[in-house]
Amino acid sequence: MNAYVMLGVFQTTQKLRTALRRLSRAGRPPLDLQMQFLRRGRCPRSVALSRKLHVGADGSRSSPAAAPQRLPFSRVSVEDLAVFRKILPGRVITDPDLLQSSNEDWLTSVRGSSEVLLRPQTTQEVSQILSYCNSRNLAVNPQGGNTGLVGGSVPVYDEIILSTSFMKNILSFDNIAGILTCQAGCVLENLVLYLEERDYIMPLDLGAKGSCQIGGNVATNAGGLRLLRYGSLHGTVLGLEVVLADGQVLDCLSTLRKDNTGYDLKQLFIGSEGTLGVITAVSILCPRKPKSINVVFLGCETFDQLLKTFQLCKGMLGEILSAFEFLDSECMRLLNTHLKLPNPISDCPLYIVIETSGSDSKHDSQKLHNFLEEAMTSLLVTDGTVATEDSKIKALWSMHI
């Protein structure tokens, strides 16, 4: 593995530890020095750093965010492009117009200066690319659906963008065990539709499901709306296939639910955000599609009432509770202004979206009725509406998504 890839973080950590040790041994500076520092105001160097911009290979400014110093990686040459085109015929993008969407995040607030976008289709192609980049000391930025809002999926400088968008094949599905194995570039919504036809669902659901990819979901340990019911991806992901920085393929693509054979290496890559390797395939445990789904939209006056409603909700709904989300009045105003979504209930400071899912509609409806009756008589909620039809359920969830 490239030394700069691994040591960049650890060198910074070591410097931080050294600085903290020195500070712990140092005494408090004299009062007159403290006063001089305060009178001078902000340190000129810190001001300069706070205004630093991301700079591309051509020296152009890219992002208004403060950027770390560019490590001494190589620049992409004509010879490098020739090698990439040999590995990925017709899937090497160098057109600036086509690169723009991959160089910036969804908010367009963070922007890189990459000059190359690679689109592999197989794990072997990813392995060849990373092996070559490692030998040439070329920096690589893995990218999935690029739906993140924190700038983690776009390059800082001129890193090569390695997109998994062409790795979108479903490899297998065990209809008995409910285990799905697919490539990392599969769009979450496509997986949802695939599973619905087989009476299963994905254990996570996100507002960006129409664009986000399962590999990126795993790399960021995405939670989503169903976290309350099915837990995090650390529990539902059964196996991963990962290509390390030197091109080595780590095959942990197990479909065994109870696997206690050695170290659980896949856990290292869930939430690693591409820093340890590129996820190329995922096997994930999928729950059965519930036969009964209800969604409730409630209004609360205070945050304390909202928390008490959550406690009551967990106690009375129990095993059928699948989601509990909230939004405030400002969110509702923005939804109405920009998305033209009307408020389904009277105006309140806080709003709650609750979803139940189970196998017996009568049983679920009765539990939900008892909960709502208790919440209203206890004055925890002031208004609400219930949806049982698909169209109304989607309309209420649109308030959150």
Image: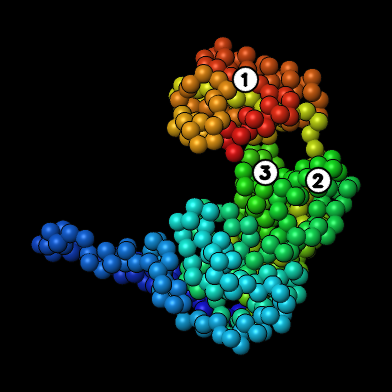
Q: Is residue 358 above or below residue 92?
A: above
Badge number at residue 348: none
**Residue sitting at 66 percent across and 80 percent down?**
84
Q: Of marks 2 and 3, which one's residue comes earlier in the chain?
A: 2
- Residue 35 position in % (x across, y down): 12, 59
**Quadrant assignment, res 193:** top right
The amino acid pointed to by label 2 is Leu
The amino acid pointed to by label 1 is Thr
- Whether residue 249 sits left or right of residue 310 in the image: it is right
**Residue sitting at 76 percent across and 70 percent down?**
122
Q: Is residue 296 above or below residue 219?
A: above
Q: Residues within 10 Å of mark 3 (few under 14, many from 20)?
A: some
SS category of the residue bearing label 3 = loop
- Residue 278 position in % (x across, y down): 65, 68
The N terminus, quarter of image: bottom right
Q: Is residue 42 visible?
A: yes
Label 2 vs label 3: CA separation? 13 Å
- Whether residue 45 sits left or right of residue 330 in the image: it is left
Badge number at residue 385: 1
Q: Which residue is mark 3?
A: 205
Q: Is residue 237 above or below residue 308?
A: below
